[in-house]
Image (cartoon, grey):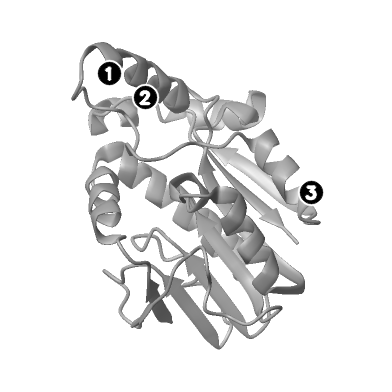
Amino acid sequence: MDTVNPPGGDNLYELLDQWLATPPGQMLLDWEQAQLDRVVADMFGYHAVQLGWPRLQALRANRMPHRWLLAGAQGQASAVSLIADVQALPFAERSLDLVVLPHTLEFAADPHHTLAEVERVLMPEGKLVILGFNPGSAWGLAQRWARLRRMAQPGRELYLPQAGEFIAWRRLRDWLRLLSFEVEAGRFGIYRPALRSEHWLARWQWIDRVGDHWWPIFGAVYMLVAV
């Protein structure tokens, strides 16, 4: 897999890595890695790209011969570094078969432009996989509440990564329709409360099974597949 590093991205990835090292961050990585391994394994073609979140090996189960990571390459044993900007991808029009955006839109300066750029480089019938935080979940509400309290208490710690502007599932579907994407599949995951302790997160593990069955739209994170 080749690697592309966005200019000025080092500080952002350092902050994300700090959060991903926490118990909820590790739980998120485990869930997302399992979902990606499942869906990308059966996606075929020649060229695949992951934009962002280098701690997540989004393409490791995919068998396309040419795979790139647009991010810092920590932990990617087979990566080769390149330099590029997510707002101006270094790929020809209609040249990619698969693009994976793991929380990329939430941390992009202009998520609309990023999606339009992805649409430009994807081939007809190309696949797009998006991962995002659900602002309507317990985690999303905890983040919103912490931001409100932060106005009165500057420096107060947030629950989720600080830089992200989280995009609702329905809103994202509308954006994709405007760009002629068709949503092929999707699912939500992680229904545990916004806790920081590994012990208490483990105690609430049972609610993931219940939530997946009874209230799937309230999962902390979602994965969406579009074509």
Q: Nearer the viewer, mark 2 or mark 1?
A: 1
- Decide: is 62 above or below 38: below
Residue name at image x 29 percent, y 49 percent: 16
Q: Position of residue 133 (x, y in %)?
A: 49, 38
Image quadrant for the C terminus? bottom right
- Disc 3 to disc 2, C-alpha distance: 32 Å
Mark carried by residue 177: 3
Foreground residue among 128 and 162? 162
- Decide: is 101 above or below 156: below
Which residue is identified by label 2? 194
Badge 2 crowding class, 10 Å Cα cut-off, few under 14, some 14 to 19, many 20 or more, is: some
Which residue is identified by label 1? 150
Q: Amino acid at mark 3?
A: Arg
Dots 2 and 1: beta carbons under 8 Å? Answer: no
- Disc 3 to disc 1, C-alpha distance: 35 Å
Ranked by sequence position, the earlier of labels 3 and 2 is 3
Q: Position of residue 123 (x, y in %)?
A: 73, 76
Foreground residue among 65 and 71? 71
Q: Amino acid at mark 2?
A: Ala
Residue name at image x 53 percent, y 86 percent: 66
Q: Position of residue 128 (x, y in %)?
A: 65, 62
Residue 31, can we see it? yes
